[in-house]
Image (cartoon, helix red, strand yellow):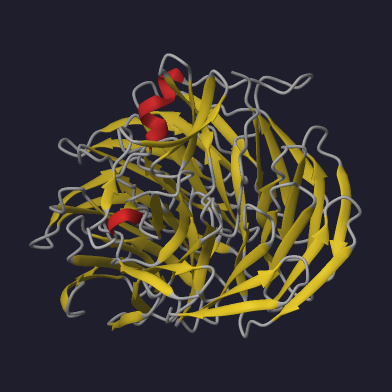
Amino acid sequence: MKLGGSQVYNSGLAFAPDCALYEQYKSQLNVGVLRGRAHAWEPCLSILREHMGPVQSVAFSHDSTMIVSGSYDNTVCIWDAVTGSLIRKLEGHNESVQSVAFSHDSTMIASGSSDSNVCIWDVVTGSLIRKLEGHIGSVWSVAFSHDSTTIVSGSFDSTVCIWDAVTGSLIRKLDYFVWSVAFSHDSTMMASGSSESTVCIWDAVTGSLIRKLEGHNDSVHSVAFSHDSTMIVSGSYDNTVCIWDVVTGSLIRKLEGHNGYVPSVAFSHDSTMIVSGSSDSTVCIWDVVTGSLIRKLEGHNDSVQSVAFSHDSTMIVSGSSDRTVCIWDVVTGSHIKKLEGHNGYVLSMAFSHDSTMIASGSSDSTVCIWDAVTGSLIRKLEGHNDSVHSVAFSHDSTMIVSGSFDRTVCIWDAVSGSPIKKLEGHNGYVRSMAFSHDRTMIASGSSDSTVCIWDAVTGSLIRKLEGHNDSVWSVAFSHDSTMIVSGSSDKTVCIWDVVTGSLIRKLGLNHHMKSVAFSADGFHVVTHNFKGSCHMWSIADLSKPPILLSPPQQFSSHQATSSSYILSIDLNQIIHKTSNGQRTSLCYLPDLGSSIYCHVRSGEKLAFGTEKGDLYIVVLHL
């Protein structure tokens, strides 16, 4: 987060405990490089743009599926960590948000603001649970205890407050000026950084001062514990990062490499690396044992005010005064081709079924068609009056359908780019589109809680399916085109009869549905919710409870000659399966139904879009 003068910066950033499959397979990683390009690529995975002011604080959820950011625009944003899409924006503060943190169970967010308040938010609904009032100055730092029962906040009023996260009551107030606070992972200690150039370690139960650590030459603006609670890392206005021994209080080493002050630091979950963000616009990754600089990440255009690791240590998120949030690949990634043509966020993508074209929908209200081989822009389709959130190709690759926040569905000729029909019938945003496999019908899901079935030839509305009580995020046809499945924010999945329009079954789960799909044989429905869980239902007996799919033992696959690409059950990555059964992790795959969509066919291409308006093609040589 960028700042000015004596701004405060957050620390105590959390790490997600639920490992992605990539970590378990990365030793087998085999990713090739596009011809004629260097063997390394810029490690920034996504740039997220939504805030209208400097981003002051960022954090990963503990299941690694979400990112939260706080900004000078007084808002808190929750992002999908895989796709980069904005899940929701939380409004409730009256001044800039200086610090944000997830609870360890990822159900709550705490935010501290210049309005002197700490807000606790419900992650699923986005509702304000309660506002904690007790400070009389800006709240610069907030953190949850690891059992999610306690919140600590540090303020410009020279106090540290410890709160009961359940009741909102003030447990204890400590008179001490701090810039940053953090809990140890066993919840027995707290660390704070102050303008006195010191780091203090406190007893979290009694509030007594255990020891004061001296070694910096200027204000300490960020502190964090290692996950085994044996070390503390601190970032200072003296441009350095210090690593401390918690038991003895001794300085293990001082890390020098930034050319500006360090407002944010964090440990990786295995405590082998430290990440630091600086006013020099860079993010540095350090080796904890040797103190050596592993890598310096450059991509922001202003001060980096907050950083955090994902639990599997493969990703870093950073927030900057340039108003962006960047997601970085810690390890070297596959090479990418960058496609430029949109003037807004890329919200949706799809491959043609012959893998020769890519369609992308954007917040600039246009649909772009790209050559998947060369990356060149074939043509730009204009016809919508608002953001295009969903695109899909017909199975013969001759048509494209797009759904927009202007509440319309457009059918396009994929060859000529001419508009065929504009379909009007929804009373809300169109979030998801799908062609039937015989290309005769189109299904659309909307924020008006309905699913519409359209005649792809005439454009007439065949029927409107009503059964959900909230936005429909994802729709899909069965491969024989006799059924439609839809997933909604009302925490249900509906299976519909295409011919009669009748509701075959409504399946209830405990979380909002993000994406849905039929298996290729039509025997199963797979659902993916915003908590990252996948469930598989048997069409033959929908009365039976679903199977919770746990990676990495189970996969959903489609054949491609002697080998095949398979989609991991957590829907996060593409895996290559050889004829002898060996599986190799290739890359992450954005989720269907989110604001970044990627459709992968046989062949070795993956395309994805970024919030910046750029598109990327990855060629994976096996």
- Name the quadrant of the C terminus: top right
Name the residue: 16% across, 35% down. 248
Q: Is residue 140 above or below residue 612?
A: below
Q: Position of residue 236 (x, y in %)?
A: 44, 47
Q: Position of residue 593 (x, y in %)?
A: 54, 59
Q: Position of residue 471 (x, y in %)?
A: 49, 76
Q: Is residue 166 above or below residue 253?
A: below
Residue 306 in sight from this viewpoint: yes
Q: Is residue 331 above or below residue 600?
A: above
Left or right relative to 245: residue 608 = right
Name the residue: 81% across, 45% down. 370
Name the residue: 74% across, 76% down. 423
The quadrant in which residue 406 appears is bottom right
Towards the viewer: 43 or 87: 87
Towards the viewer: 65 or 410: 410
Left or right relative to 136: residue 402 = right
Q: Which residue is outermost to the left?
A: 206
Q: Which residue is outermost to the top?
A: 580
Left or right relative to 323: residue 456 = right
The quadrant in which residue 488 appears is bottom left
Towards the viewer: 327 or 191: 327
Q: Which residue is outermost to the front?
A: 499
- Name the quadrant of the N terminus: bottom right
Q: Is residue 570 above or below residue 414?
A: above
The quadrant in which residue 399 appears is bottom right
